[in-house]
Image (cartoon, grey):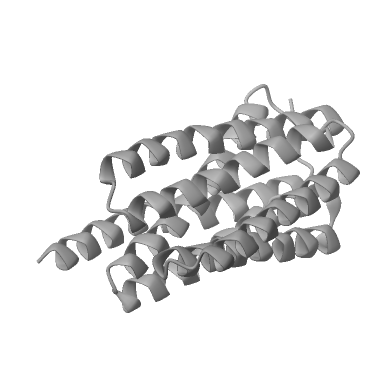
Amino acid sequence: MKKAIFFILTMAAACIFTGALPAFSAEHAHMEAKNQAATVTKLADLKAGLRDLWIGHVFWVRNVVVATKYGDNEAAKVAEAAVVENAKAIAGSIEPFYGKAASDKLFGLLAGHYGAVKEYMTSAYANDKTGKDSSRDKLIRNADEIAVFLSGANPYLPKETLYGLLTAHGGHHMKEIEALASKNYAEEAQVWSDMKAHMYVIADALAGGLAKQFPEKIR
């Protein structure tokens, strides 16, 4: 019964996110490709769109973590496919500014991020400390790689700032997994709240950096 309720709630929420995320990515890319005149609300729209995308990331990864914990393989499979599609959308959001090669590079880095999170989850559920340590190191290295890439593309996104934001994000993933592994649901609820707020910080930082680098496109 509990599994059924979880699946119903998960899929209901999925309908909300899958309707919003691709729409933003496609609309934003189309608008920028045509180089439409900037409006006073454009920066606000960019922030809102990036927030949706990054919230989608933690939403779907959490669904994988929860479904795997309770052995719902079908739900985990659906959620993982959504993680991949969301990563494509996040990577696609930078294509109008930096091109297809940069978008592909970011997608690869995001895939590495998710791979490390999934490895940590598997190790945590198996009480494998060595595996957890290894995947934690991968998350940290990946955060550095993403920070180097984005700061190299945009001088208004300092590498150390990005690294701090991304390592904190990885820490949230690990804390969430540990809370679920130990059935500490109150702790997991708090981590989820913190994680969502942190996604807004990351999204707003990226939007702000883009606005400074491309003032003719974003105002």
> How many dots with numbers?
0
Q: Is residue 154 left or right of residue 131?
A: right
Q: Is residue 48 left or right of residue 9?
A: right
Residue 65 picture location, percent across and down? 40, 61
Residue 69 vertical position relative to residue 199 in the rendered view, above or below: below
- Front residue (pair 187, 158): 187
In the rendered image, the quadrant that contains the C terminus is top right
Residue at 77%, 54% in the rendered image: 95
Q: Is residue 36 left or right of residue 60?
A: right
- The reply to whether residue 179 is in sight is yes
Residue at 41%, 75% in the rendered image: 77
Residue 140 picture location, percent across and down? 70, 51
Q: Is residue 48 left or right of residue 101?
A: left
Residue at 73%, 66% in the rendered image: 108
Q: Quadrant of residue 171?
A: top right
In the rendered image, the quadrant that contains the N terminus is bottom left
Residue at 54%, 34% in the rendered image: 198
Q: In the displayed image of the protein, which residue is found farthest to the top?
A: 40
- Front residue (pair 117, 16): 117
Q: In the displayed image of the protein, which residue is found farthest to the left?
A: 1
